[in-house]
Amino acid sequence: MDLHISKQKQLKGEVSIPGDKSISHRSIILGSLAKGRTRVQGFLESEDCLNTLRAFRQMGVEIRKVQPTEYLITGSGLYGLKEPDQVIDCGNSGTSMRLLTGLLAAQKFYSVLTGDDSLRNRPMDRVIEPLSRMGAQIWGRSGYYAPLSIRGTGLNGLTYTLPVASAQVKSAILLAGLYADGDIQISEPGYSRDHTERMLKGFGIELKKERTQILMPYEKERVLEAQDICVPGDISSAAFFIAAGLIVPGSEIYIKNVGINSTRSGILEVIKRMGGNLKILNQHLEGGEPVADILVKSSQLRGVTIAGEIIPTLIDELPIIALLASQAEGETVISDAGELRVKETDRIKAMVMELTKLGVEIIEKPDGMIIHGPATLTGGCMVDSHGDHRIAMTMGIAELLTREGLTMKDRQSINTSFPQFYELLRSLM
Ligand code: S3P
């Protein structure tokens, strides 16, 4: 597909960012398990989240759309889900598959989860392994690739140290743990996003958190109480507009309603270190999550080193950060980010391949990349999204800096997380 959005003089105006993908998934899951009616406002109507929504409808939960982005969930209670009479298709969504694996492992029924070509080739052992220690019965191709076949059963408590910081793994264990007959203790090697912990507490579940340690003590008959949830804008989507504002000369963009939870906002710190002109305004709490507006102006950026503890807090933003680095003066080194290789595509390989086509000096490392900037991007070529929404949007922003535009394979993969991407981008032109 070729959209011919090229060489923008400047981007100016205001955009409101659609709902957070991670929080939208969790609102459907916990709303479905609650007693009573949960109202979700600002739900992200992207393919990934709609896959989670359909999965719960398949399990008998009544989820009604009242108006755009607003849904009413009539919870089935913790023990009210029904056996799905069809395979559940998670599409491209790793979050749907991993969180559902945890939940389904504890149900009194049998279920099968599948996904698209990308998802069927992503490792599920990271959830199967701890869940099996709890007594779960899960089978997959070669042991751990979807389709996954799950025979729900009674589960034990678990004390577990995650080998890598992962919100999906932590959340799968916590969801299974709601049904376990013992305590759940999780320790993470870093700070992954904490939306599940926050939302579980909001629904009335006792959970203690100290730094990267979680304790969810055993409780006999748990009840989740229905909630009103206001989903903040997704910082991972806002990241593309922040980047565009920084690198398209003469730009000034006011980005409204962005979730700035510290387990997600590593990109803001990196941009400050790069010398980006960015202001965080109107900070407030919404439904237990910190939210703000962001004002960004085009800036002279400099290369930085990004490694260690900050990585899980910006893991989904690394493709767009690599593009920022290509426009920064000097060298940017990204390391400790081997997790990028098991996302919707191998994002290290994909970014190196695509930025090289655009004339960027970039070196692949096993756990990251080294980028030398600034580069003048060559347009007129064919780039590939690798079927990955975040690579597609990164290329969509890169295109703004090319004279001839780009032709992109699988541009529509953007719909996975941000169907309004081009509509909002055009509103700034
Ligand atoms: C997510 C967690 C992250 C992230 C993904 C969404 C979530 O994955 O990359 O896009 O909603 O829990 P990991 O938990 O595997 O790091």
Image (cartoon, grey):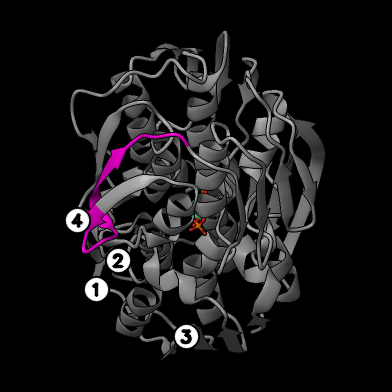
Q: In the rendered view, would you say 359 is above or below 388?
A: below
The range drawn in magenta is 140-154
Q: How crowded is mark 1: few (under 14 residues within 10 Å), some or many (20 or more)?
A: some
Disc marking residue 117: 4
Residues 347 and 75: in front is 75
Horizontal and vertical percent for residue 256? 65, 39
Q: Residues within 10 Å of mark 2 (few under 14, many from 20)?
A: many
Question: What residue lies at 46% left-to-right and 13% top-to-bottom?
Answer: 76
Q: Is mark 4 on a helix, strand or loop?
A: loop
Residue at the spot of label 3: 375
Question: What residue lies at 48% left-to-right and 54% top-to-bottom?
Answer: 133
Q: Distance between the residues labelled 4 and 1?
A: 29 Å
Q: Earlier in the sequence, mark 1 or mark 2?
A: 1
Q: Residues within 10 Å of mark 4 (few under 14, many from 20)?
A: few
Mark yes or no: residue 257 visible: no
Looking at the rendered structure, the kind of residue marked 1 is Gly
Horizontal and vertical percent for residue 241? 54, 53
Q: Tell whether label 4 touches label 3 (CB within 8 Å).
A: no
Residue at the spot of label 2: 405
Magenta highlight on residue 258: no
Residue at the spot of label 1: 380
Q: Quadrant of residue 6?
A: bottom left
Looking at the rendered structure, the kind of residue marked 2 is Gly
Within 8 Å: ligand 1 and the Cβ of disc 3? no
Side of 150 where 351 appears, left or right: right
- Does the magenta stretch mainly form a helix, a strand or a loop? strand
Q: Tell whether label 2 touches label 3 (CB within 8 Å).
A: no
Looking at the rendered structure, the kind of residue marked 4 is Asp
Q: How far apart are marks 3 and 4 (CA)?
A: 34 Å
